[in-house]
Image: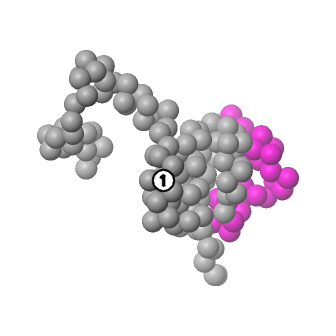
Amino acid sequence: MPKKPYEDTRLAKFISQRIMELRPRKSQTEIAIEAGFLSRNMLSMLKSGASKLPLDRVPSLAKALDCDPAYLLRLTLEQIEGDTAAEALMDIMGTAVTENEKAWLHEIRAASDNTNPRMTARSRASIRAIFGK
């Protein structure tokens, strides 16, 4: 069986995971309708990696998947352009910050009394330890 062009992308895996997580609340068909896809099969093609996500569908699909649009955009850019090009676009346009990342930033500012703490080896190690790295 030939490999699908976007099968191993983080976007295909993320969409599959979110659809599965949302299954108790809404069907894949409902998600496709909410996202504005004319073909109900489009989500299957995205999940399997047979098709890439058009950039103009990022906002509506993010809403339908109940996920952060900045994160979905980042994954879409990786899929469309590749890691290096996606990083270059983010360097030029600025890194898209997700709502979850904004919450982390808020906590860092609160914990530091807004003193603008610099990243040290110790603070980097502490953050990475939270994620088991």
Residue that numbered label 1 is attached to: 92
Residue 93 position (above or below residue 22): below
Magenta highlight on residue 43: yes
Hey, which residue is sitting farthest front in the picture?
A: 92
Q: Residue sitting at 46 percent across and 46 percent down?
A: 95
Q: Residue sitting at 67 percent across and 54 percent down?
A: 55
Going by the image, does 31 lie left or right of 66? right
Q: Residue sitting at 25 percent across and 44 percent down?
A: 128
Q: Residue sitting at 48 percent across and 53 percent down?
A: 92
Hey, which residue is sitting farthest left in the picture?
A: 122
Residue 22, visible in the rendered structure: no
Q: Secondary structure at mark 1?
A: helix
Magenta highlight on residue 26: yes
- x, y (%) of residue 105? 36, 30
Q: Which of 21 and 4 lies nearest the eye of the viewer?
A: 4
Q: Which residues are magenta?
A: 25-51
Residue 38, visible in the rendered structure: yes
- x, y (%) of residue 123? 19, 38
Residue 74 position (above or below residue 99): below
- x, y (%) of residue 44? 71, 59
Mark 1 Cα within 10 Å, few/some/many (few <14, many 20+)?
few
- x, y (%) of residue 12? 59, 59
Going by the image, does 61 lie left or right of 38? left
Quadrant in the picture for the N terminus: bottom right
Residue 9 position (above or below residue 121): below
Q: Image quadrant of residue 61?
A: top right
Q: How is the image coloured?
A: one colour
Q: What type is the residue that disc 1 sits on?
A: Ile
Hey, which residue is sitting farthest bottom in the picture?
A: 1
